[in-house]
Amino acid sequence: MSLVWLSTTVAARARSRIRAGEPLANIAAWARGEARFGLRTERTTQTIIAGHAFIRNLRRGHYELGIDAPRGLRVAAAFTELAGAI
């Protein structure tokens, strides 16, 4: 067993142990209220929330978009109508 092989193996195992702790770090950051996964500003968060609400309301049929389409295709039909309007 060579010294180079031993040092690279030890370093690789140390890195994998650090990577194994990353999910726990993400959970801890979420518990502290820190922004994770690209939601770093309030504006980004508001945009994501507004888009989610729009799609949810679209699927429920609250807008007169894609009404004639079957329920499973309602979102696609609504975006086709919106693209024609723009």
Image (cartoon, helix red, strand yellow):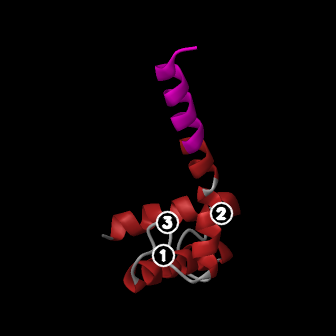
Which residue does the image show at 49% across and 76% down from the upper left? 35
Q: Choose mark 1 or mark 3, whichever is in front.
A: 3
Dot 3: few (<14), some (14–19), or many (≥20) neighbours within 10 Å? few
Q: Is residue 73 above or below residue 81?
A: above
**Element assignment for label 2:** helix
**Label 1: which residue?**
48
Residue 82, horizontal then vertical, whole percent: 41, 69
Three-letter code, disc 1: Ile
Residue 70, horizontal then vertical, whole percent: 67, 60
**Label 3: which residue?**
37
Q: Is residue 46 visible?
A: yes
Could you tell me how far apart the alpha carbons at marks 3 and 2 are, in whole angstroms? 14 Å
Q: Quadrant of the C terminus?
A: bottom left
Q: Quadrant of residue 21?
A: bottom right
Could you tell me how far apart the alpha carbons at marks 1 and 3 are, in whole angstroms? 12 Å
What is the residue that sits farthest to the top in this orientation? 1
Which residue does the image show at 57% across and 43% down from the upper left? 14
Three-letter code, disc 3: Phe
**Label 2: which residue?**
24
Which residue does the image show at 55% across and 25% down from the upper left? 6
Q: Is residue 68 visible?
A: no
**Element assignment for label 1:** helix
Q: Is residue 9 above or below residue 52?
A: above
Three-letter code, disc 2: Leu
Could you tell me how far apart the alpha carbons at marks 1 and 2 are, in whole angstroms? 25 Å
Q: Quadrant of the N terminus?
A: top right
Residue bounds of the magenta highlight: 1-14
Q: Are marks 3 and 2 in contact (CB under 8 Å)?
A: no
Depth check, front residue: 57 or 21: 21
Residue 13, horizontal then vertical, whole percent: 60, 37
**Left or right: residue 68 compared with residue 41:** right
**Left or right: residue 35 compared with residue 27:** left
